[in-house]
């Protein structure tokens, strides 16, 4: 008979050694493809083409990571001023762009290039270092406050699901969240993220009506205090947040999110710290989960930890993850998960991928369960506001069982016609043990502020 403590200790040591031998990255609930393409949008963090100061590495706050555009370091939720700028300036096909508010004649030296871009094979071109900081030209951000003491935002995603078999189609809300942020001191942030849980089976309101269900639907996803703007782009936060692990894709039905246990409802209570100058970074978190009575908490009671470190460069990223979870407080399955991943900026192409292993430990004479999850995405920028994508998901939930693995192939387009608006259309083919099990169409309409 095997003991859980011995198994966990053996696997924890082995996976910790694996994590030490690979480079690792922090996850995000935003669209990670934007982080990979950040080097092609220099004006998100820099006053370009108006010139900018190039600070010492320890003083840099820009990054090819989610915390460059989001208040929450693990991504998703309220946008920073740079994130708002990126969403208005870079993404939409039409709409007023913040850069149109500035008068370039006031700042441009003669012959200054109009655009900077990075190529993995050709390097950086179209850039001159300047002496003007982003904050010194407030009109460059247009109606965006570059240093707010208070801000708010929202995300709404509605979905239409059309299975190409005998199942019924469904229209339902995927997300309806409100964000609040206060900065009473230059290095102190107070943050909250709350919203309503959507469901394909029930939706908002369900059969009993909205008011009867609103208590069950309320979710307080994140609530934390953060100290940031520390040299080395470091931060520390305490409270409720999403634990860092892998590419946190906006499609929470991806196997590396939903089936691995990191979907949109996975938040924990704990302390997290990070260090992220260009380009080396590290991150560590310890947490407790499963607080009964907390709005929206669906996790089993337990304690855990995450430890990550890695490298993000202008043309590439490579990473891995380590996650430990002890559910002994609920006499449920403990688990250890580890993964590696990567991203490439091959403008106008972008590539990202992830591979994860998980072991769940069972008491008694039951065998432990090993599983594998994988994700690959090829993203093609057709023109401003229009992107095509090809995705592949894979999972084998129990490596000892034959023919239980699942493959999913996705072909889709993402259209951002106007400021604050995004639409996504995907065709997904699902196969179990190479036999077709479900073909489906998914349409998502996303509105954000």
Image (spheres, rainbow, N blue to C red):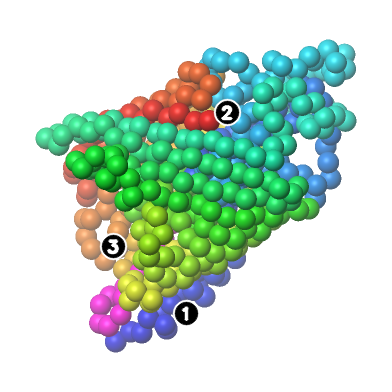
Instruction: Mark 1: give few (<14), some (14-19) or many (20+) Cα within 10 Å.
Output: few
Badge 2 element: helix
Location of residue 64 in the rendering, given as x and y in whole percent from the top left corner = 64, 41
Extreme residue toward the left, this view: 166
Of badges 1 and 2, the one in the foreground is 2
Badge 1 element: helix
- Write the start and end of the magenta stretch as one range: 356-368
Which mark sits nearer the N-terminus, 1 or 2? 1
Q: Any mark on residue 398, and which?
A: 3
Which mark sits nearer the N-terminus, 3 or 1? 1
Please name the residue that numbered disc 2 is placed on.
87
Of badges 2 and 3, the one in the foreground is 2
Query: Can residue 316 be seen at all in this image of the molecule?
Result: no
Residue 295 lies left or right of residue 18; in this view the side is: left
Please name the residue that numbered disc 1 is placed on.
9
Of 9 and 228, nearer the camera is 228
Location of residue 182 in the rendering, given as x and y in whole percent from the top left corner = 64, 45
The structure residue drawn at horizontal position 53% and vertical position 21%, both measured from the top left corner, is: 419
Report how far apart the C-alphas of labels 2 and 3 lie in the structure. 41 Å
Q: Are marks 2 and 3 in contact (CB under 8 Å)?
A: no
Residue 255 lies left or right of residue 115; in this view the side is: left
Extreme residue toward the front, this view: 211
Location of residue 383 in the rendering, given as x and y in whole percent from the top left corner = 52, 18
Q: Does 361 lie within the magenta span?
A: yes
Location of residue 218 in the rendering, given as x and y in whole percent from the top left corner = 38, 48
């Amino acid at each position: 008979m095997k003991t859980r403590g011995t198994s966990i200790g053996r696997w924890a040591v082995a996976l910790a050694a694996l994590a030490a031998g690979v480079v690792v990255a922090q996850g995000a609930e935003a669209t990670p493809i934007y982080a990979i393409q950040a080097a092609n949008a220099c004006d998100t963090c820099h006053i370009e083409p108006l010139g900018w100061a190039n600070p010492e590495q320890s003083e840099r706050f820009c990054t090819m990571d989610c915390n460059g555009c989001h208040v929450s370091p693990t991504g998703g939720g309220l946008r920073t001023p740079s994130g708002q700028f990126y969403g208005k300036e870079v993404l939409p096909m039409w709409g007023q762009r913040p850069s149109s508010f500035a008068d370039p004649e006031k700042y441009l030296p003669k012959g200054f290039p109009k655009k900077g871009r990075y190529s993995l094979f050709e390097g950086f071109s179209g850039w001159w270092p300047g002496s003007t900081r982003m904050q010194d030209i407030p009109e460059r951000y247009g109606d965006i406050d570059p240093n707010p003491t208070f801000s708010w935002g929202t995300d709404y995603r509605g979905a239409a699901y059309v299975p190409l078999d005998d199942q019924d189609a469904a229209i339902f809300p995927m997300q309806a969240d409100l964000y609040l942020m206060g900065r009473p001191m230059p290095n102190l942030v107070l943050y909250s993220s709350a919203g309503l849980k959507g469901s394909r089976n029930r939706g908002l309101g369900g059969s009993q009506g909205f008011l009867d269900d609103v208590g069950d639907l309320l979710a307080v996803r994140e609530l934390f205090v953060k100290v940031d703007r520390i040299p080395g782009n470091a931060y520390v936060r305490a409270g409720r947040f999403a634990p860092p692990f892998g590419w946190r894709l906006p499609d929470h039905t991806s196997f590396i999110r939903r089936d691995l246990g990191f979907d949109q409802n996975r938040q924990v209570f704990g302390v997290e710290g990070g260090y992220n100058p260009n380009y080396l970074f590290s991150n560590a978190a310890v947490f407790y989960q499963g607080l009964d009575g907390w709005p929206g908490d669906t996790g089993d009671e337990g304690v855990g930890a995450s430890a990550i470190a890695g490298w993000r460069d202008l043309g590439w990223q490579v990473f891995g993850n380590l996650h430990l979870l002890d559910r002994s407080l609920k006499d449920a399955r403990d688990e250890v998960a580890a993964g590696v991943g990567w991203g490439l900026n091959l403008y106008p192409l972008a590539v990202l991928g992830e591979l994860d292993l998980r072991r769940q430990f069972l008491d008694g004479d039951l065998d432990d369960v090993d599983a594998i999850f994988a994700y690959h995405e090829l993203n093609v920028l057709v023109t401003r506001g229009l992107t095509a994508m090809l995705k592949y998901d894979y999972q084998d939930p129990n490596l000892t069982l034959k023919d239980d693995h699942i493959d999913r192939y996705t072909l889709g387009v993402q259209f951002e016609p106007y400021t604050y608006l995004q639409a996504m259309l995907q065709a997904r083919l699902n196969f179990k043990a190479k036999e077709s099990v479900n073909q489906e169409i998914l349409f998502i309409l996303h509105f954000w502020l």
